[in-house]
Image: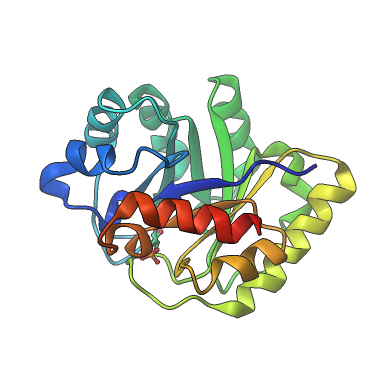
Amino acid sequence: MSHPVVIAPSILSADFARLDAEIQRIPDADWIHVDVMDGHFVPNLTIGPPVAKAIKKVTDKPLDCHLMIEDPGRWVGDYVEAGATNVTFHVEATNDPVSIARKLRESGCGAGLTLKPGTSAENYLEMVSEFDLVLIMSVEPGFGGQSFMPDMLDKARAFRAEIDRLGLDTRLQIDGGISADTIAQAAAAGCDTYVAGSAVYGAEDPNEAVRTLRSLATS
Ligand SMILES: O=C(CO)[C@H](O)[C@H](O)COP(=O)(O)O
């Protein structure tokens, strides 16, 4: 099943002192991507539920929360309460991703599965029907501004094949080093949902960057 392209700028690369204004600079974005880091699962510390809730107040766009945290099952409810549309968590941080996905879906929130670059798709393909979104990390999670890892496209192809084989409408998202130079490769590998931080907020006109990414992903 093919979806319209979604461009989800990551506010990790925005000015945290002016988040409301930074979000208003990207009216053509489809989703707002919120990178949650706990200083344990990844060596960086960013934002938590109160900030997600504050962001929700200043935008009607879906809030796409990527939890780079330990023990995600303990915290997902807080992001649902904060107004998340999707909550994506790492398979490396839990022994029971399916239970967490079911909890999210029962609360009316989309469930997202994600894997670090070193984790292979093999053990997780079979659970794809439990998820609304699969996120392929194309950098090591933790920081914006890193280089795209083209080897991750094989993982995207494997998930795309399984999603299509089962006829699911699960979205295939990619995050890390997505720019005008890399987005077409990700599209060719079957991705339909793109996170971009520095390529959007590092541009002189972030909204123009969003439009350019969308057009390169669809051409
Ligand atoms: O999850 C992330 C880092 O862990 C970020 O969303 C991602 O890296 C986006 O930044 P950039 O587009 O600059 O690579």
Residue 30 position in % (x across, y down): 47, 39
Q: Is residue 93 left or right of residue 17?
A: right
Q: Is residue 120 left or right of residue 216?
A: right
Total of numbered circles in the picture?
0
Residue ID at (28%, 58%)? 201
Residue 151 position in % (x across, y down): 63, 79
Looking at this view, name the residue that lies furthest to the left: 17
Q: Judge whether 48 appears above or below 62 on screen.
A: below
Q: Nearer the viewer, residue 32 or 218?
A: 218
In what quadrant of the picture does the C terminus appear? bottom right
Residue ID at (53%, 20%)? 107
Residue 28 position in % (x across, y down): 42, 40
Q: Is residue 100 left or right of residue 157?
A: left
Residue 197 position in % (x across, y down): 36, 59
Q: Judge whether 203 appears above or below 56 on screen.
A: below
Q: Judge whether 182 appears above or below 165 on screen.
A: below
Q: Nearer the viewer, residue 203 or 177?
A: 203
Which colour assignment does the render follow? Answer: rainbow
**Looking at the image, can residue 22 be seen?**
yes
Ligand 1 occupies quarter? bottom left
In what quadrant of the picture does the N terminus appear? top right
Residue ID at (71%, 66%)? 188
Q: Judge whether 206 appears above or below 59 on screen.
A: below
**Looking at the image, can residue 121 be seen?**
no
Residue ID at (41%, 30%)? 61
Would you identify the image quadrant in which residue 115 lies? bottom right
Q: Nearer the viewer, residue 11 or 109?
A: 11
Would you identify the image quadrant in which residue 166 lies? top right
